[in-house]
Amino acid sequence: MNYLLGAFKPACNISITFSDGKNRKQVPMKKENGQTALVPLFQSQETLSGKVCVEPYQGKKVEHNGVKVELLGQIEMYFDRGNFYDFTSLVRELDVPGDIYDRKTYPFEFPTVEMPYETYNGVNVRLRYVLKLTVTRGYAGSIVEYQEFMVRNYAPPPPINNSIKMEVGIEDCLHIEFEYNKSKYHLKDVILGKIYFLLVRIKMKNMDLEIRRRESTGAGANTHVETETLGKFELMDGTPVRGESIPVRLFLAPYDLTPTHRNINNKFSVKYYLNLVLVDEEDRRYFKQQEITLYRLKEDASS
């Protein structure tokens, strides 16, 4: 029985290493098993190079039909788990069919790779980049190794960044005006604003400002929408008086945010909202939601 089990064990050990692996920044990435591992960080238009190693176990040879390495950008919907949609697919053939008796190393390079989307791990979808090494074999089954890496893309501050001004009210009961200093924020930014009470005829218990993320996947009848409240900030406790204004200062850095993603490859979108919530003494809730755009600032390499 042990002999039979041994017959199906891989005949070699294979690995992938990046050329600048020791110097390149490593960032934490959550794996499928829930654990976190450090992976190298890249951005679009960078060159990915390194080497792959195929090392037969002692006394064994590896018969193969070719060795190749692929760079894949993939989107996976969790309701269709296991089926990956490839939006980027590059391949380098490293060896022709033959036999490997001793440790063999192959260099590879993917120059100035277009990686337009950021790595994303969401509620119903994930977008990943991976190097896939395949030692192709026939009846014995191919040997495959994966090396994930993370992609983050940076943007300059937008040339036009208008403030947000809105009114919300209940006829003859409540009329408030709120203003946020910008409509586009980088991930470590501070939201500044003011809330003006023009009419208050109901007794208020408290007022909160929430940051919400809305993830939409699929299309048409198969659209799945997940909304998460990432943070809540109490602006006021008690009933304000007419003419009162309350300042808003909300730091984004403590929250787990990503840039806004709009219709990524017609598969998913990720949008962010500021949700102003008022609660009266009878626990009735009044709210006004406003979309904001998030981006990753070029100078902010720490994010």
Image (cartoon, rainbow, N blue to C red):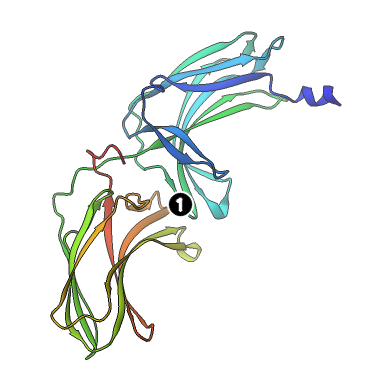
151 relative position to 32: left or right: left
**In front of the other: 65 or 151:** 151
Query: What residue is shown at x 47% (from left), y 47% (from top)?
Result: 126
Q: Residue at x 43, y 38 (%)?
A: 28
Instruction: Tell me the quarter of the picture where residue 134 sits.
Output: top right
Residue with the most extreme right position: 1
> Hey, which quadrant is residue 236 in on the image?
bottom left
Q: Is residue 83 visible?
A: yes
Q: Residue 93: horizontal and vertical position, in percent? A: 50, 20
Q: Nearer the viewer, residue 255 or 289?
A: 255
Residue 276 visible in the snapshot: no
The local secondary structure at tag 1 comes to loop
Identity of the residue furthest to the front in this view? 238
Classify residue 299 as left or right of residue 72. Answer: left
Q: Name the image quarter holding the C terminus.
A: top left
Near-viewer residue (171 or 81): 171
x and y percent of residue 33 in the render?
58, 43
Give the amino acid at mark 1. Gly
Q: Residue 18: x percent and y percent?
A: 43, 22
Q: Residues within 10 Å of mark 1 (few under 14, many from 20)?
A: few
* Image position, residue 281 (x, y; %): 35, 85
Q: Quadrant of the N terminus?
A: top right
As drawn, 172 above or below 299: below
Query: Considering only vertical position in the picture, is 143 above or below 219?
Result: above
Residue tagged 1: 122
Against 252, residue 66 (above or below) is above
| Viewer-closest of 73 and 255 | 255
**Left or right position of 107 against 153:** right
Residue sitting farthest toward the bottom: 172
Say above or below: 177 vs 295: below
Q: Residue at x 20, y 78 (%)?
A: 176
